[in-house]
Image: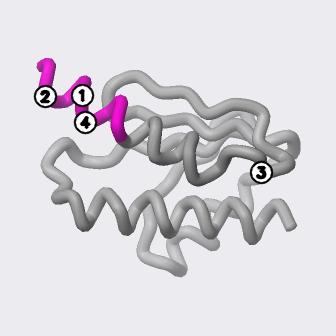
Amino acid sequence: NKRIAKKGKKLLNNFKSELKNTNGIVDIRGKGYMIGIQLDRPCGELVQKALQQGLLINVTRGDTIRLLPPFVMSKEQTETLVNKVTQLVKDFLK
């Protein structure tokens, strides 16, 4: 679906913009609405920290945050997701 691809690309670009120049980020990649944020260290503990903030994330390969948000998110929900995950990652990498 072209609409989902477009929204997914925008979501990916939002994460890239918010996390650029953040030490500890190896790569930020995505396909559709699936986003991966690879860090330079193990980050499994972020799953629990995210849950405490009402976020459901997964960590794969031990160092990559995987996000699979729903296609039906509003603009406000998307902004909240980007802001919360960005802050979570930045706090972890301090």
Q: Residue at x 40, y 33 (%)?
A: 34
Question: Which span of residues is magenta-colored?
Answer: 1-10
Find residue 92 and report its horizontal and vertical position in percent.
77, 65
Tell me the number on the disc at residue 6.
1
- Does the segment drawn in magenta span residue 8? yes
Label 1 with label 4: CB-CB less than 8 Å: yes
Find residue 65 and report its horizontal and vertical position in percent.
61, 45
Tell me the number on the disc at residue 3.
2
Label 3 with label 1: CB-CB less than 8 Å: no
Q: Residue at x 35, y 62 (%)?
A: 79
Q: Earlier in the sequence, mark 3 or mark 1?
A: 1
Label 3 with label 2: CB-CB less than 8 Å: no
Tell me the number on the disc at residue 7.
4
User: Which quadrant of the rendered structure holds the N terminus?
Assistant: top left
Measure the alpha-carbon separation of dots 1 and 2: 5 Å
Quarter holding residue 59: top right
Residue placed under numbered mark 3 in the picture: 22
Q: Is residue 53 left or right of residue 43?
A: left
The relative height of residue 2 versus residue 43 in the rendered view (above or below) is above
Q: Earlier in the sequence, mark 4 or mark 3?
A: 4
Label 3 sits on a secondary structure element that is loop
Label 4 with label 2: CB-CB less than 8 Å: yes
Tell me the amino acid under the disc marked 3: Thr
Label 2 sits on a secondary structure element that is helix
Find residue 45 and report its horizontal and vertical position in percent.
73, 62
Q: Earlier in the sequence, mark 3 or mark 2?
A: 2
